[in-house]
Image (spheres, rainbow, N blue to C red):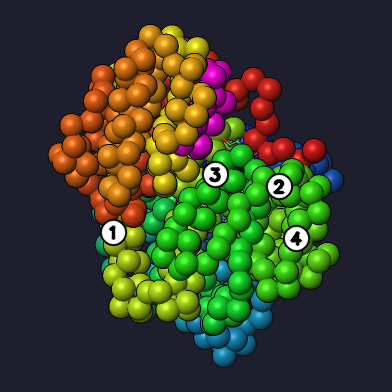
Amino acid sequence: MCGIIGYSGDQDSIPIIIEGLRTLEYRGYDSAGISVCTEEGIKTVKTQGRLTVLEDKLKENPELGGGCAIGHTRWATHGEPSDTNSHPHSAKNLTLVHNGIIENYAEIAEMLKGAGYTFESETDTERGAKLIDLLYEKYQDPIVAISKATKIIRGSYALGVIFNDIPDTIFAIRKDSPLIVAKGEDGCFIASDIPAILKHTKQYYRLAEGIIAKVSKSEVEFFDMEKNLTEQQLETVDWDVEQAQKGGFPHFMIKEIHEEPEALRKTLEPRIRDGLPYFDIPRLDGDFLSKFGSIHIVACGTAMHAGLIGKAIIERIARIPVNVEIASEFRYRNPILKKNDLVLLISQSGETADTLAALRLAKAQGVYTLAIVNVIGSSVAREAEDVMYTRAGPEIAVASTKAYSVQCSLLYLLAVKLAVLNKTMSEDEARDFCARMLTDIPKTVTSALEMSTKICEAASRLVAAEHLFYIGRDMDCQLCTEASLKLKEISYIHSEAYAAGELKHGTISLVTDGTPVIALTTVGKVCEKTISGIREVKSRGAYVVSICSEELAAKYDIPCDEQIIIPHIDEILSVFPAICILQLLAYHVSAQKGLDVDKPRNLAKSVTVE
Ligand code: AGP
């Protein structure tokens, strides 16, 4: 996602725009830009890098000023971060900023080329700008041009548009991406989100889809797609700026956990075409992957834990051996790699030093490298031979949550692709599996989010713990590793993830009266065995929290002190609502301890050093 702001009024627009963009940097920060309506026409200053880089560039243009401007801070989705790919983007008659993804940008580009248009950037946004321009040339009406353009565009968008020959006026429209419109004492605004205008007014309109806003210095008007004047509901916000950046949530982490359903939809939807996995990477969409004998997943921390889930699902449905490695170990142990191995790097930031080193080592040995990365244009993304981008949007909290979930979703899609190639799954079975992923994963994660109150109560009984175990078998055991890390890194409670069947080989000596044990049971074939493990710890005084699927809770009487039932989903997909519950549990423990949930001690969001 990106941050948009527009202002028209009697004040100098530049400081207002810059200040507004600063409050929106949580939405994206790899590049920024501003376009100002001046006597000599629209002037644009834009650059790769944080907002401070744009501010430095503006200092080189001290004469630039005007009462109407649009600004943008970017989270790259089409085209790597660069000066050219930064917004705003211009055409002959107009300049605009965009938040969203134009899915049919290629087909729009072909149409525009036929009309003589050329392009400077790689972005879908520039193609959108020139489409509106083409229609403005034809109809000579901004509202008609925008209305007709949005009937051609497929995808998500929030657009702020200024026209050369309509000074001091901003036109805005949105679909899927949020956009608000506001009238303050010193002018009128558009913005992606409330923080950007909060200093000027607490009243705003949440622009409805299919409505075009016309924002001038002193008034805001709304038109439907047939250019009829219409009304919008005025709302009032009672947040301060910091709360507003978190969407009203107390911390970024809880906000980002709540973004999981949308992040999963945005990651999965474009990657399922004709019902089958589609990576928009020619090699991957053919039978290229069928030549690999084994897969090495290499990553750190949470990303490595997603790799453990990847191993479990790929081996289960594609029957291809997968080896998961900690990058800092992999890079120094002179790994044995064969020419037909696939090395898969997973990284949210794409800048983790150990993961990057592992990538370079694999490439040096002539092994094919594929990356799953969240940050477009990051080092891992650029250096891997192919990259699949998750679409989680910026993850601000140090503790990774939505990134883990979308990494797992891509690994599931990869597993289905491999299974079809390996003929362990028919195309019909694959279509059914993908369809269930698309409908059931976001839905059940949403249901898990609605359990937050119950989970918060369970968390209150763990706040005083000094030591805690997570136990499970099979996929549950892999989930425990991530659940344990989440709790450790934000609540500072020592916890261990342990294979339920392994406890009796020594570690159970640590279990005493009241030791909390979180027992995961979603995998039917090993449930009875896990219950044996639960009985072992209960007989030694453990306080057991059972996190269990609906079916297994109905089928077995799981000995526990309390139980949290996972929203109903196919067992093989239960990872997704289950991890949401476990993330919420860790979050509430930390929040109830009054800790700095978003910035835990000793930790950085991206470990770019060894
Ligand atoms: C996750 O909560 C941690 N912040 C950390 O383990 C993180 O997952 C790890 O440093 C890897 O980061 P990356 O995904 O950006 O490579």
- Residue placed farthest to the bottom in the image? 114
Report the amino acid beneath label 4.
Ile
SS class, disc 3: helix
Name the residue beneath numbered marker 4.
336
Residue occupying the point 67% across, 62% down: 343
Q: Is residue 450 visible?
A: no
Question: Which of the marked residues, 1 or 2, is nearer the chain's N terminus?
Answer: 2
Report the Cα–Cα distance between label 4 and label 2: 14 Å
- Residue placed farthest to the front in the image? 505
Report the amino acid beneath label 3.
His
Question: Which of the marked residues, 3 or 1, is nearer the chain's N terminus?
Answer: 3
Start-end of magenta stretch: 481-499
Residue occupying the point 61% across, 73% down: 292
Badge 4: few (under 14), some or many (20 or more) residues near its Cα, within 10 Å? Answer: few
Report the amino acid beneath label 2.
Ala
- The reply to whether dot 1 and dot 4 touch (C-beta < 8 Å) is no
Residue occupying the point 30% across, 25% down: 535
Check mark 3 vs ligand 1: CB closer than 8 Å? yes or no. yes
Name the residue beneath numbered marker 3.
305
- The reply to whether dot 3 and dot 2 touch (C-beta < 8 Å) is no
Residue 74 lies, with reference to residue 605, above or below; the image says below
- Mark in the foreground, 4 or 3: 4
Where is residue 379 drawn, in percent x and y? Answer: 74, 55
Where is residue 427 drawn, in percent x and y? Answer: 35, 79
Name the residue beneath numbered marker 2.
327
Residue 453 lies, with reference to residue 285, above or below; the image says above
SS class, disc 2: helix
Name the residue beneath numbered marker 1.
439
- The reply to whether dot 4 and dot 3 touch (C-beta < 8 Å) is no
Badge 2: few (under 14), some or many (20 or more) residues near its Cα, within 10 Å? Answer: many
Question: Which of the marked residues, 1 or 4, is nearer the chain's N terminus?
Answer: 4
